[in-house]
């Protein structure tokens, strides 16, 4: 039996509120305070998926190519990314993360995971509660990947 439209709507409201509040709290945890969320997203994408063109990064992040170019320029000036000539087409350029950029992503992930684990520990959740959270996170990933 499928859930009702009202149930989907109520779940959507609850999920939106909880997700935004948690995301805002986790975004405060950064290895570099001056880095924007957009800059971090580009670094995280490059770390996860490897080299990419400016256009594919812009498409993935849902921004214009000129906006992505500004973001990449800032990351390049800071030493977090480099532009590498495309091996197949020398007219194209690939953006790649540097070891320093990779370290920033790793340090930020550790900070965020530590902050979240600390918040969970402070709430005295039972093992059953934590299992519910793990199952809910799997469902949230399904929604996010849709």
Image (cartoon, helix red, strand yellow):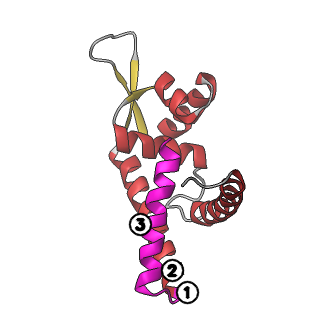
- Above or below for 85 versus 133: above
Is 44 or 85 nearer to us in this picture? 44
Of all residues, the one furthest to the front in this rendering is 1
Disc tally is 3
Examine the image and state in which quarter residue 52 appears: top left
Is 21 or 131 nearer to us in this picture? 131
Q: Secondary structure at mark 2?
A: helix
Q: Which mark is residue 110?
A: 3
Residue 128 shows up from this direction: yes
The residue that label 1 is drawn on is 123
Location of the N terminus by quadrant is bottom right
- Above or below for 124 versus 81: below
**Answer yes or no: do the residues labelled 1 and 3 have beta carbons within 8 Å?**
no
Callout 2 crowding tier (Cα within 10 Å): few <14, some 14–19, many ≥20:
few
| Most frequent secondary structure within the magenta stretch | helix
The residue that label 2 is drawn on is 120
- Distance from label 1 to label 2 (Cα)? 5 Å
**Answer yes or no: do the residues labelled 3 and 2 have beta carbons within 8 Å?**
no
């Amino acid at each position: 039996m499928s859930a009702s439209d009202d149930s989907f709507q109520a779940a959507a409201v609850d999920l939106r509120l909880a997700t935004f509040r948690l995301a805002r709290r986790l975004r405060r945890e950064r290895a570099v305070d001056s880095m924007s969320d957009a800059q971090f997203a580009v670094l995280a994408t490059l770390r996860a998926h490897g080299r990419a063109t400016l256009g594919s990064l812009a498409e993935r992040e849902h921004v214009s190519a000129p906006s992505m170019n500004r973001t990449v320029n800032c990351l390049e000036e800071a030493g977090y990314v480099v532009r590498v000539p495309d091996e197949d087409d020398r007219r194209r350029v690939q953006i790649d993360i540097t070891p320093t950029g990779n370290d920033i992503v790793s340090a930020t992930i550790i900070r965020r995971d530590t902050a979240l684990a600390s918040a969970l520990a402070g709430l005295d959740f039972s093992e059953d509660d934590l299992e519910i959270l793990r199952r809910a996170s799997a469902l949230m990933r399904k929604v996010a990947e849709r």
